Amino acid sequence: MNIASLNPEDEEAPLGALDHLVGYHLRRASGAFGTDFARAMEGTGMRQVLFGILSVVGANPGINQGAAGRSLGIQRANMVTLINQLSDVGLLDRQTAAEDRRALALRLTPAGETMLRECLERIEAHEEQMLAGLTASERRTLIALLAKIEGRRL
Amino acid sequence: MNIASLNPEDEEAPLGALDHLVGYHLRRASGAFGTDFARAMEGTGMRQVLFGILSVVGANPGINQGAAGRSLGIQRANMVTLINQLSDVGLLDRQTAAEDRRALALRLTPAGETMLRECLERIEAHEEQMLAGLTASERRTLIALLAKIEGRRL
DNA sequence: TATTGTTATACTCTATAACTATA
DNA sequence: TATAGTTATAGAGTATAACAATA
């Protein structure tokens, strides 16, 4: 019963250079979060992007579709379908903006407010589970480091 | 000249609850890395997934297609197309494994070795740029924290 | 002219189910 | 029966270009 064969098939194979790359670990960690997020949202119809929109609109009632997208890094063209989806299920209300008749002002419906609140509860449990291995201080550090990286996008 | 209007359109709108969620910041940071990775790889035809495969195969010559996928979190079915792409451009060699005629043993071609080496150079510059705001110690911390999170996937 | 939202489109990544050939 | 690879397919995220209405 040898501990490791030359061609490892039971243990995970070493990753090579990849293992030292921040980008790789970001991708895997983000993917793991995404998968568990989907599981946590089961039955609600919410996804990461859609919840993001609910959150921003909830925090900025009457915000323009474009501005909401910009704050989330979502392109104009892609916002259309996403807003349609939220509107179609009655979570979001869109009306031509009074000051600028090109723009659409977004607001949560009462159902949208409820959905935001209920999802947030589930998400907090999901984050708690995904971050169980990290102390409160480590979680703060992690967010701070990630925020620095995001900043470099713009 | 007021600092912030009630309906912010020039500044970025606040994100609401989203801003305290690790999952959100992971997604944005990972996306930023992905975009810059693509820019850094321009002209090579390499993408994050494909480079990952090159790296693992390079570190484990003769590894089975399935084992390579498992170590990267890529499903069997999706490996097929990816390996085809690498094989089609002559970066990767696949041969029926001697010990198990169901399996395919993967190896880098000389061109694959070169591609791996050259991409790695570009990637190191790309990571350096994306992480310019972080000290060496912060980078180590970040990788360590991310690794803990990934572990929770399996 | 520039901007808001829209349509059309295409590419990548990921996921599931069913098949084949070997073991 | 189980495993390695394959095929087919579908959903989701993101990207670009071109257009209409409004500013």
Image: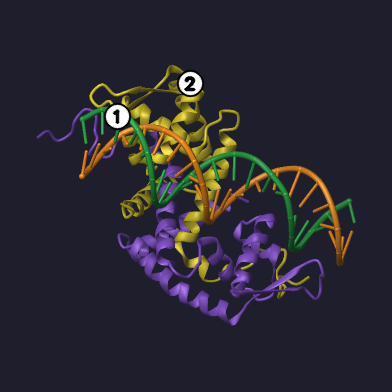
Chain colours: A purple, B yellow, C green, D orange
Which of the two marks, 2 or 1, is nearer to us in this view?
A: 1
Write the residue at 47% across / 19% down.
Answer: B111
Q: Position of residue A119 (x, y in %)?
A: 47, 72
Q: Position of residue A46 (x, y in %)?
A: 51, 66
State the separation of the CA atoms marked 2 and 1: 22 Å
Q: Position of residue B83 (x, y in %)?
A: 44, 31
Say which element carries label 2.
loop
Write the residue at 61% across / 66% down.
Answer: A85
Asked if residue A49 is positioned above or below residue A100 in the image, the reply reads above
Amino acid marked by disc 2: Gly
Could you tell which of marks 2 and 1 lies nearer the N-terminus?
2
Which quarter shows the N terminus of chain B? bottom right
Q: Is residue B10 left or right of residue A132?
A: right
Chain letter of disc 1? B
Residue linked to disc 1 = B102
Chain letter of disc 2? B
Tell which residue pokes out farthest to the left in this image.
Answer: A1
Amino acid marked by disc 1: Arg
Write the residue at 51% across / 23% down.
Answer: B89
The front one of D6 and A30 is: D6
Would you say residue A25 is visible in this rendering? yes
Asked if residue A78 is positioned above or below residue B92 in the image, the reply reads below
Residue linked to disc 2 = B90
Res A81 → quadrant: bottom right
Would you say residue B60 is visible in this rendering? no
Callout count: 2
Number of residues whose C-alpha sits closer than 10 Å to that of mark 2, classed few (under 14), some (14–19) or many (20 or more): some
